[in-house]
Image (cartoon, coloured by chain):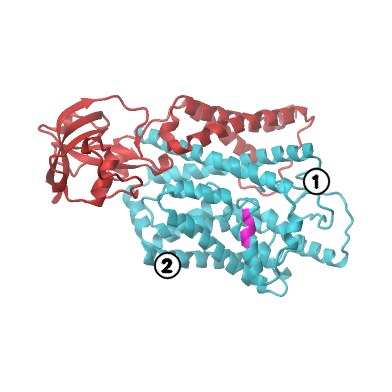
Amino acid sequence: MTTIRSMSQLKPWLDVMAMGAWGLLMFKLWFTGQLYLLIHPNYMWMAFASGFVLIALSILEGWRISRQRRYVDAEQHFTLIMPSLSSSLLLFVAIAGLLITPRPFASDTALHRGVMDSLSMTRNKPESFRSNSKPEERSLIEWKRTLDVYPEPDAYTGQKVKLQGFVVHTSNLPDNFFMISRFVITCCAADVYPVGLPVKLTQSRSAYPPDKWLEIEGKVITETIDGNRQLAIQPDKLTPIPEPKNPYDY
Amino acid sequence: MNQLSSAFTLFLSLLVEAIPFLLLGVLLSGMLLLFVSERKLIALMPKHPFLGALMGSLIGFLFPVCECGNVPVARRLLMQGAPASVAMGFLLAAPTINPVVIWATWTAFRDQPEIVVLRVVLSLSIATIIGSIFGMQKDIRPFLQPSLTRYMFSDLDSPEPAAQSPSNLLQTGTFFLGQPGKSLQSSVATLPAFANIPDPIESKPLVDRLQMLLENSVKELRELGGILIIGSAIATVIQVGIPREIIINLGQGQISSILAMMLLAAIVSICSTVDSFFALSFASTFTSGSLLAFLVFGPMIDLKSIGLILTIFKKRAVFYLFLISAQLTFLACLFINLNVR
């Protein structure tokens, strides 16, 4: 009997804890920069602001409950899931988020999401397409957008390239090629999609294991891969770099 | 292991992106409903079936409720004497035709603005059509739950019902808690008679209203947040766990993709404020028409809202509602799939 009563007294505090934990989680993601892995920078302020609102709600609700002498359980109407289950779920996920560090997507996700099919297409319509930008200043996504507009690889032959990205080994490429790739984000990690360009090596790609971050300097060549003429990169210099804090392209 | 960690990243990102919108929806609608009189609004509503349905569909702009909040409001509109067409238009359109939802959809589909526009246009059209159909009925009462009609009859007979213990129509699963006193006590069967009580919201002191806002927001967040978590988990599992070939085959079929997304919408029951983020995770593999089907159909009919709608309408009416809205959504989205690229 006492247990039942103390259980039901505990219930409203679940909400307080859940909202508080979510507020803390938003702050943690913001201050550690992990928010960069999850959402587009345009929306980060919203996550941060909602952290404040959640903490405020948690404090106010705690204050409200502590003034209430008796908890009235009035959940008799239709709900899809039980209220206390719902609060526990929220609390549980927030705690998991506080404990686990989200990892950026890696090459297996790139393969799963089809880095191969995106060779000549991007989902984005070019938002800020600058055709006069210097070739060596183009990022991967800018190269892709440029190619979307004018796909003939010969037109770019000999242009300088300087890119950062991670290594993906795709099965359609010969052993002396790998794909230098990056993910593009428009809203949140649910919509990231990979873009990549093939890099031609003089040796086997096994020297560059998947997921390794590299800075590539080189020039553009045209290669026929899988029966398709396409743009590839002939590197002059391959420098290993640490994984950037913000791994996405925009 | 890698797959597990990308699944977690994906899951968390859906939640982090969606929660600010959920908070905004909950707080904004709570505030508006506690501070705006819906009574005066009803007086302005046209009686004509089509115009009424159109107006009803548009007043969602003033009451940004999602599909859990619209049912109690629609029910209260009916009880306060709003024409059936208005209430029906509101019921179906309000979860989509409101600023928070449109903004969230825009956030998710910046790259495909046509999705945002078509979502609004289709939802508005379907809600107006169904609202007009129901508005055409001379007598809506055969479609309504007896508990509701009993109340409506008594209202006709005695325009001044005793202002007895004010109970609350608006329960959890509503976006607001606009009624007086000991909130959250009425069961569905006991209908209150407060239609002619002077506007209760306006007579409440500010402190009480704020406290109701807090209490209600917490309830909403708890319930909708729980469903959001389950919905995000389902989206993640589908995205990470199911082989890409299967998803692509299903998602690229003009018809199969629409049916799959409508089924998903009905099961997942994710709140319309945040459903665009859910849909976004399918944007690269599913046809645009099927994404629209999800965004249009989900807010009207899903597992969660059917339970709520049954508190207003009889089973037969809910079945018609389901059938007509499903058909209209399917046909419109198929048309888009086949003709728009």
- Magenta span dominant secondary structure: helix
The part of the chain drawn in magenta is B57-61
In the rendered image of the structure, the colour used to display chain A is red
Residue B207 screen position, x and y as percent: 78, 36
Q: Quadrant of residue B22?
A: top right
Task: Name which residue type carries label 1.
Answer: Pro
Q: Which chain is cyan?
A: B
Which residue sits at x=59%, y=66%?
A: B128
Chain of the residue where label 1 is placed in the rendered structure: B
Tell me if residue B110 comes above or below residue B145 in the rendering. Answer: above
Q: Position of residue B110 (x, y in %)?
A: 43, 48
Q: Which residue is mark 2?
A: B335
Indicate the quadrant where residue A196 lies: top left
Of the image marks 2 and 1, the number of the one nearer the N terminus: 1
Q: Position of residue A200 (x, y in %)?
A: 14, 37
Q: Which mark is residue A36?
A: none
| Residue at horizontal 75 percent and vertical 45 percent from the top | B184
